[in-house]
Amino acid sequence: MGESVAEATLTAWLKEVGDTIEEDEAVLEIATDKVDSEVPSEVTGVLVEKLFEVDDVIQVGQTIAVIEIEGTATTDVTPSETVAVATPLKEVIAQVEAPMKEVAETVVQSSDTRFYSPLVKNIAKSEGILQQELDGISGTGKDGRVTKNDILLYVENRSSQSVQQKTTSNVVVEQNKSAVTERSRSAETKSTSVPINEGDEIIEMTRMGKLIAHHMVQSVQTAAHVQSFIEVDVTNIWNWRKKVKADFMKREGENLTFTPIFMEAVAKALKDYPMLNVLVDGDKIIKRKSINLGMAAALADGNLIVPVIKNADQLNLVGMSKAVNDLARRARSGKLKPDDIQGGTYTVTNVGTFGSIMGTPIINQPQVGILALGAIRKVPAVIETPEGDFIGIRYKMFLSHSYDHRVVNGALGGQFVKAVADYLEAWDVNREV
């Protein structure tokens, strides 16, 4: 996982207990925010235990499953950490002369003969299950091992006489909480239900759709959204791109779009106004040193994803073009990695792709601003010259800047979008790329 990714949701097991797994073969699928990934096995062996179920949230560094390979011993770990041990066969052979006594002392076990995974031991500890009681639980795992499901089933079914009164009270409280939660959910479902008429089609929201919906509602409820709009004359950019795009494609093998040009201007403006390159954490404002630009991209299924261009202010136009094109291609093909959508400090979305001349985008929390690029239109405009004013045909577009009024006032929000416009209008028509 990437450095900024702390957890992931298990979405599907691709292998079952007892299945033989080859090295680099996918074992399960996980999801982080809007990116799905497969987790491959680092070794060849047999899956003997699953430590998590579908929809469980797993922290980076936790052991997901146990894979048994020939000649491997599982080393002891403390409850505060989990370690996956996978020793290649050639290393096992090289260590075959190691004292067996030392190996036996390091095996994770709570009795002389029975193995317990760190997860099972942690559950037993949290539920107040004594060692003697744990040893009496029947296991359904390999060689009679107690699995996560075994111990959870035992906790659910055990009689009140077999546990301390404190543990029983805690279980009752948790059950009551679950019952209240279920009643609340039922009441919520009932209050928000709508009548279904004949011929209506019910479409379940996708997992990504649910995440986006939750994120957007959270943003509107959290940030005080304010918008500033400005019209920009991009005639010089239009003519310059038309002049150089063929040579650019021939030399770089990449299509030169307008997006990297706009991204470059936004990165420059953020350096001029660093208080737009901040994040809000409760009552604290975190001023980011790196300028990481999120680039909203529409997917084929109608959902939206925001890959991030890291350190955008350090890229020249060629580097920016390659980064934009690479992220766009991998977004469309579903090849983005979890870290590709993490760490953004400001977001740009191109509503002009769909013909909109402007929009009022929702801030990507916990950022404080997002810029919408409108469609470029050929319009009549007043052109000022030393000889006087006259009407001419110009290429123009609107920039729509949404910002969080909790930390960005109208002056700063307006100055920032004006700076972006100034950089675009001052484009050098003789620029080399």
Image (spheres, grey):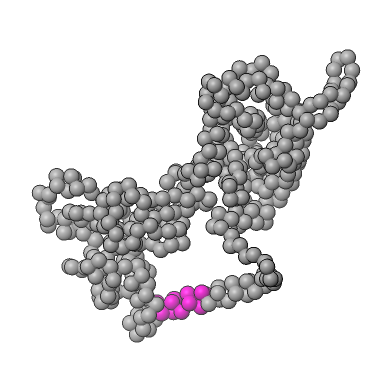
Q: Position of residue 430 (x, y in %)?
A: 66, 16
Q: Residue at x 67, y 48 (%)?
A: 362
Determine which quarter of the picture holds residue 170: bottom left
Residue 330 falls within the magenta-colored stretch: no
Q: Residue at x 58, y 25 (%)?
A: 317
Q: Residue furthest front?
A: 199
Q: Position of residue 144 (x, y in %)?
A: 24, 70
Above or below for 104 versus 256: below
Q: From the viewer's perspective, tell me whether residue 360 is left or right of residue 62.
A: right
Q: Position of residue 333 (x, y in %)?
A: 51, 43
In this view, the residue in front, 324 or 362, is: 324
Above or below for 252 versus 1: above
Q: Residue at x 35, y 67 (%)?
A: 148
In this view, the residue in front, 121 or 152, is: 152
Q: Is residue 110 visible?
A: no
Q: Residue at x 26, y 51 (%)?
A: 44
Q: From the viewer's perspective, tell me whether residue 19 is left or right of residue 211.
A: left
Q: Residue furthest top?
A: 387
In this view, the residue in front, 232 or 40, is: 40
Above or below for 363 versus 141: above
Q: Is residue 124 visible?
A: yes
Overall secondary structure of the magenta stretch?
helix
Give the residues in magenta. Answer: 166-178
Determine which quarter of the picture holds residue 298: top right
Residue 170 falls within the magenta-colored stretch: yes
Q: Position of residue 53 (x, y in %)?
A: 41, 63
